[in-house]
Image (cartoon, rainbow, N blue to C red):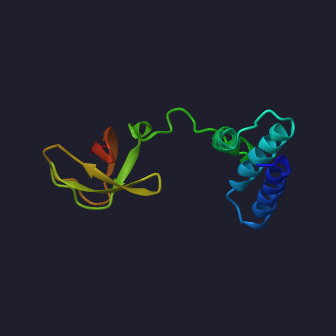
Amino acid sequence: MAWWVWILAGLGLFGLEMLTPGGFFVFFFGLAAIVVGALAGLGLTAPVWLQWLLFSLLSVCSLILFRRRLLGQPPPARGSAVGSLVGDVAVLLDDLPPGAVGKAELRGSAWSVRHDGPDTLVRGRRCRVEQVDGLTLRVRPE
C-alpha cells in the first residue's frame, strides 16, 4: 500500500479514538499505522505483507506494553492474586455444616467456602481463610 494510505488510516483511527468513550484501544492501532506509513515512505517496507505484519505486531505490542502506563494504572501488585487471601477473615453468609460448601463474604465479594471441621458454623460467624482451592476457600473458625 502507498505510504500516505497508512498515514490517513492512522489519523482516521486517532479521530475514531476521540469519538469513542473510554477504552483507549484504537489509539495504538492508529500509532502503528502512522509508523508503518513512515517506514513505507522511507522505502523500508516494500512488500505489502510486511506492512501488514508490522502493523499487526506494532499494534498489539504497543497496546500490551503501553496502555496501562498511559492510563495511569499501576501494575498489579505482587501477591494480589487469589492466593493472597490466605489469612484474611471472611463472614459466613450461610450455615456451614462440616465438609459442605457454602458462601462467605470476603473483601466485598461472595466466595464459595468449605469447612472440614467437626462442628457446624453458623451464619454471621467470622472465619479465617486457611487455603485457596481454585475459587473455593477453605476456612476455619476464628
**Residue at the image position 64 percent from the left and 44 percent from the top:** 56
Work out which residue is located at the far front of the displayed protein and give it: 47
Q: Is residue 61 above or below residue 12?
A: above
Please identify the quarter of the rendering in which residue 132 is found.
Answer: top left
108 or 44, which lies in front? 44
Left or right placement of residue 117 versus residue 69 in this view? left
**Viewer-proximal residue among 22 and 79:** 22
Q: Quadrant of residue 65?
A: top right
Q: Residue furthest left?
A: 118
Residue 18 in sight from this viewpoint: yes
Please provide percent x and percent y for residue 33: 76, 48
Give the residue displayed 80% in from the left and 41% down from the top: 35
Question: The C terminus lies in which quarter of the figure?
Answer: top left
Q: Position of residue 61 (x, y in %)?
A: 65, 39
Quadrant of residue 130 within the rendered picture: top left
Say left or right for 95 vs 8: left
Give the x, y percent position of residue 128: 34, 42
Q: Nearer the viewer, residue 7 or 92?
A: 7
Residue 43 in the image: state x and y as whole percent. Answer: 83, 35
Q: Is residue 56 left or right of residue 116?
A: right
Whether residue 73 can be seen here = no
Task: Indicate whether 102 appears above or below 34.
Answer: below
